[in-house]
Image: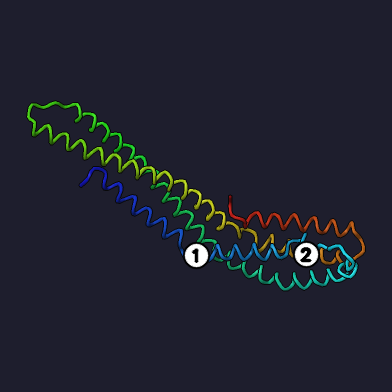
């Protein structure tokens, strides 16, 4: 077997495991649900929903806005709730994928250490064999050929190590993102969404009054809750 070939075979197996996990159906569905939630929350952004544009129809729009906001909220909230419920049910599978991705990352790190050892050993052998002087020309040529072969393998292993260095960073990033997605539903369905619903209802009620302080207070609370939910659902940069 070629020098270090086993390590390169192991690298191929780890890369396959990484790909299978990253392309898993549960993860794809979780990402889709997260994107749907972000889309619906964007549609219900308080600053957009309660905004009143200027112009000659400003007064009419101000009167119509609460009704439009009601319609929009009560039409989209069930969709938000349904997506959150699906994501909550899927969360254990997504968290398990994150755990397996971290295991792949640890295996990459162990493989990286083995490659370092092989590369150092290979360089030592090349230097050692290169310094051997034999009276037998045939044996000398054989040693030189072996040293050249090992040197080529060291170059190949070094390239594999560079790929693994990149893979470790990639897997670590994916694992963090997947773990965040798996925990995005923590408290969302039974705590944050009900609070968001209550705050939205209060803001809608305040919008029907002619009391700007009440409107400002209600929208401020709603905006804070809305921002917290968005922060949980948005993927890490």
Q: Is residue 77 above or below residue 104?
A: below
Q: Dividing the picture into quarters, in which one does residue 15 lie?
A: bottom left
Q: Residue at x 69, y 62 (%)?
A: 42
| Nearest-to-viewer mark from 1 and 2 | 2
Specify the farthest residue to the right: 210
Q: Dividing the picture into quarters, in which one does residue 124 lie?
A: top left
Secondary structure of residue under mark 2: helix
Spatial CA distance of label 1 from label 2 is 33 Å
| Marking on residue 49 | 2
Q: Residue at x 46, y 58 (%)?
A: 22
Secondary structure of residue under mark 1: helix
Asked if marks 1 and 2 touch (Cβ < 8 Å), the reply is no
The number of numbered badges drawn on the structure is: 2
* Crowding near the residue tagged with mark 2, few <14, some 14–19, many ≥20 C-alpha atoms within 10 Å: some
Q: Residue at x 16, y 27 (%)?
A: 132
For the residue pair 96 and 40, the one nearer the viewer reads as 40
Q: Is residue 91 above or below residue 155?
A: below
Mark 1 — residue? 26
Is 155 displayed left or right of 185 in the figure? left
| Marking on residue 226 | none
* Crowding near the residue tagged with mark 1, few <14, some 14–19, many ≥20 C-alpha atoms within 10 Å: some
Coordinates of residue 175 in the picture (x, y in percent): 50, 52
Q: Earlier in the sequence, mark 1 or mark 2?
A: 1
Task: Check the image and tell me how it is coloured.
Answer: rainbow
Q: Dividing the picture into quarters, in which one does residue 4 lie?
A: top left
Is 49 displayed left or right of 171 in the figure? right
Coordinates of residue 226 in the picture (x, y in percent): 72, 58
Coordinates of residue 140 in the picture (x, y in percent): 12, 31
Is 171 displayed left or right of 130 in the figure? right
């Amino acid at each position: 077997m070629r020098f270090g070939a086993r390590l390169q075979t192991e690298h191929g197996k780890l890369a396959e495991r990484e790909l299978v996990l990253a392309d898993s159906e549960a993860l794809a569905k979780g990402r889709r649900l997260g994107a749907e939630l972000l889309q619906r929350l964007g549609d219900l952004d308080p600053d957009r929903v309660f905004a009143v544009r200027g112009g000659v129809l400003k007064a009419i729009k101000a009167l119509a806005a609460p009704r439009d906001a009601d319609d929009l909220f009560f039409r989209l909230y069930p969709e938000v709730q349904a997506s959150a419920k699906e994501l909550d049910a899927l969360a254990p599978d997504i968290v398990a994928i994150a755990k397996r991705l971290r295991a792949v990352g640890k295996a990459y790190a162990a493989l990286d250490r083995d490659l370092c050892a092989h590369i150092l050993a290979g360089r030592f052998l090349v230097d050692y064999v290169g310094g051997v002087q034999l009276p037998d020309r045939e044996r000398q040529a054989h040693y030189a050929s072996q040293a050249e072969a090992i040197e080529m393998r060291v170059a190949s292993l070094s390239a594999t190590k560079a790929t693994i260095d990149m893979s470790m960073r990639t897997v670590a990033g994916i694992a963090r993102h997947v773990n965040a997605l798996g925990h995005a539903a923590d408290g969302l369905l039974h705590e944050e969404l009900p609070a968001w619903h209550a705050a939205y209802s209060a803001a809608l009620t305040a919008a029907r009054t002619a009391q700007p302080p009440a409107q400002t207070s209600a929208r401020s609370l709603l905006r804070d809750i809305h921002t917290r939910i968005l922060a949980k659902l948005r993927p890490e940069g």
